[in-house]
Structures are given as structure tokens and as C-alpha cells.
Amino acid sequence: MSKKIQAIRGMNDILPGQTCIWQGLENVFREVVCEYGYRELRIPLLEFTQLFARSIGEVTDIVEKEMYTFPDRNGESLTLRPEGTAGCVRACIENGLLHNQVQRIWYSGPMFRYERPQRGRYRQFYQFGAEAYGMEGPDIDAELIILTARLWKRLGLEDVSLELNSLGSSDARTAYRDRLVQYFRGRREELDEDSLRRLETNPLRILDTKNPAMAVVVAGAPLLLDHLDDPSRRHFDQLGELLTAAGVAFDLNVRLVRGLDYYSRTVFEWTTDQLGAQGTICGGGRYDALVQLVGGRPTPAVGFAMGVERLVALLDAQGFVGVEERPQVFLAVSGDRAVTTGFRLGEQLRDRIPGLRLLHHCGTGGFKSQLKRADRSGALFAFIIGDDEVEASSVTIKPLRGGEQQQTISQNAAADFLAERL
Ligand code: HAM
């Protein structure tokens, strides 16, 4: 035997039995975004590396160390998308979707980041995302957040909470950045190696540190929220009012900065404590400067993305079934003539009852073993066809759940029988 070839670390197979949860979640997501007027955009998995470097920021973890980047056969540097926003912006500009119009867009699919794999953190993972363009007020920020809250409600997810912050305008952020650098320079000896490096490149990210030894120095840092420009302050206050009016509770988290550089003003995350260390199920915010940075005209923008694996884990734990896959009818047959009759009857039933889940027994095995399989399949009824049934153009129906008696009826009556009961 040859040596087994395995999947790449951090890249998962999603197996039958799990995919029904994925499909159920996908259906609910599609339903909810559609209800709010969002339309789907499909974008490539590969883009020029420059797109992500410029959008996400050269000095972010993603661009510095997590991208799957390689030269193609022409020597062009390409990157497997680590997130969807940059590609979405590129596609909208390239296809003229932003000119004199607003857009509400959603997308889904795999993203790739070379992170250290652990529970809830993978190298290929799936996101659902939504982005809105051309609207600068807090109403659209509120709409997107309210939409996510609606999704949790529809899915029956309860233990999730919303954290909100504002990063202000880019001018306010530059001024704040200077203040922050000054503060951290004054306490240089308390900074770890990572933070010393960030002090020169991306000091806001120091606030995001997970190093407990840095907790005190970070706690004493000046707060961006205290240095917001007036329009950003008003935007933030109004967003809070809109969320409250819609019944969406939130916590202010003044340390929330997010790991991507394109944000301005609103940032938010939905978290849960049911998933261990990787408890953020959804993150997003406003990114008013990005469209211009990617080469379009200035266009206000806001969006979010959620991690599908993390949502599936939550849903699985609470017994979410997703798309029902169990057959309704298991067709047990014995003898060549019964097999032929079974297929004829099966197609008649499918004509009459679209969506009917009917599983044919194929292969060998007597009725006894077939009925065991029928029971294990979760089917509601076993339809049995042997020589007697072939002769009489009948079918014997054995209910597998509930108290109904077994009965033999004409094959012509089988569709009505099912239509009454399903
Ligand atoms: P992000 O926070 O990098 O934001 O990712 C969004 C969500 O994707 C996270 O909250 C998490 O649930 C999931 N996620 C991220 N990395 C992994 C991973 N390695 N394994 C499993 N799940 C993961 C963005 O991607 C932005 N594009 C969101 C956005 C859209 N902002 C504005 N518009």
C-alpha cells in the first residue's frame, strides 16, 4: 500500500452528517440578508497580493505572516484571499457598482490564513459577510448590526454579546496615535518585544495585546474614545440610540481596535464564551477610506464577516438539525421483478410529491436486514415490495415511527397515502 496522503494542517473536510448543519445555517443566512435587501456577489479566491497588502495594512498580522502568497507561472505575486472585504471593494470598483448608487452586498466562501490551528481557528475557514456602500450615516451601521442580531434570533443563538467601539476619523486617530506613542515611549521598559516593534509601526495594536504582563501599562493608556472628533462622537451616539430602539443590547469596549487597518469610526464584534479562546463569531465596522485606497472614488462603507465554523460549533452543541436529510420512505425490495417495480413506483411518487426523500434499497440482503437498515435510516415508512406485491400491483407499508398498523394498499394509492401523512 502506498503511504497515505493527508489533508493540509488546518484545512478540514466537512463530512456528511455535519454538512446538513452548514446547509441549514447557509439557508438561514441567505434568507435573512435577502430580507434586508442584500444581494450576493461572488468573487475569486485569488487576487493580486498588492490588493490585500494595501487594504488590510502592511503591518498587520494577516499581511505580515498569515497570507498564502506565491508567484504564478508568470511570476505575478498572488494571494489566496484571507478575507472578503478587499476583494468585494475591488470588484465593486472594477464593475462600476459604486458610481452614484448605494449597494448592499453579501458573500460567502472560504478564506485562507496561515495561523496556528486550534479549536475554532483554521487555515481554511468559511465566512459569511455583508458590506454596504455609499451610505455615511449611523443608520446603515445600525442596520448591519440589527441584521446580525436577527440572524442569531432566527438561529436560536442566545449566549452572544455585542461589543462596540469607535475609532474616530482618520485625523482624530492620527492625533491619538501620537499621544499613544508618547505614552508608550514614556513606559518603554514595560513593553514586550512585539509591542516595541508595533510602537513604531502600528501602536494602536498594542492595545490589543494578549500578554498579561502588559495589562497594567495598557490599562493606563489614553483612550481613543476620549479623543474622538465631534462628528464621530455624534455618529457613535446615534448608533447607540438606534440599536437601543431596535432592542439590540451592546457593551462599550474601549479597547476594541480589530486586527485590520482599514477601519474608521464604528467597530464591533459579537462574542460568545461557549467556544473557548476563539469566541469571536462576527466582526466588522466602518471603512470609509478603503474604496479610495483601492483606486475608487471616496465612498463610505461598512460591513461585517462571521466565522461559519464557529457558528456551526455553537449550533451543533445546541442540537440544531439544519437541513433534514433523513429519508421519509425506505423502499425495501426482494427479487428482480420487485426491483423494477420499485423504481417505477419510486418515480411515480417523486412526480406526485416533489421533495419526497425516498431511499431505495440497492444491493443484496433479505427483508429482515433491509428493515433494520430502514429503521436506522430514520425513515418514517418502509415500503415493501416482494413477489406477492408485484403480482397484486400492491405495496406493503410498515410505519416505522408512531403507532399505525402495517397495511397493504394498491401501488396507485401510495402517493395519496404519503400526501396525507407527510
Ligand atoms: P475578521 O475579524 O478578521 O474580519 O474575521 C471575521 C470573523 O471570521 C471572525 O470574527 C471569526 O469568526 C472568523 N475567523 C477569522 N479568522 C478565522 C480562522 N483562522 N479560523 C476560523 N474563523 C476565523 C474580517 O475578515 C473582515 N473582512 C470583516 C469585515 C467585513 N469588516 C468589514 N467588512
Image: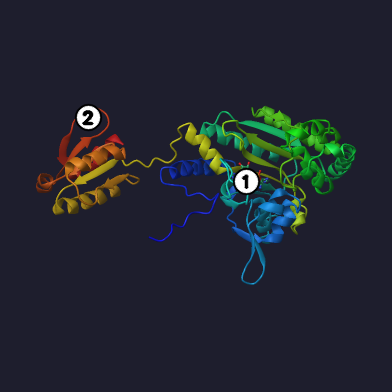
Closer to the chain start, of discs 1 and 2, is 1
Name the quarter showing ligand 1.
top right
Residue 120 image offset from top left, x and y in percent: 57, 41
Type of amino acid at the residue the image marks with label 1: Ala
- Cβ of mark 1 under 8 Å from ligand 1: the answer is yes
Give the answer, above or below, for where 76 lies relative to 348: below
The reply to whether residue 383 is visible in this rendering is no
Relative to 122, say whether 292 is above or below: below
**Does 29 sit left or right of 413 as displayed?**
right
Q: What residue does disc 1 label?
A: 130
Instruction: Look at the image and tell me whether residue 235 can be seen.
Output: yes
Closest to the observer, 129 or 35: 129
Most foreground residue, 396 or 31:
396
Q: Which mark is residue 167?
A: none
Applied colour scheme: rainbow
User: Residue 139: percent from the left, percent from the top?
Assistant: 71, 38
Location of residue 408 in the rendering, given as x and y in whole percent from the top left corner:
15, 38
Label 1: which secondary element: strand
To which residue does mark 2 refer? 404
- In the orientation shown, which residue stands out farthest toward the bottom? 74
Quadrant for the C terminus in the image: top left
Type of the residue with mark 2: Glu
Residue 48 pos. (x, y %): 67, 62
Q: Residue 372: name its quadrant.
A: top left
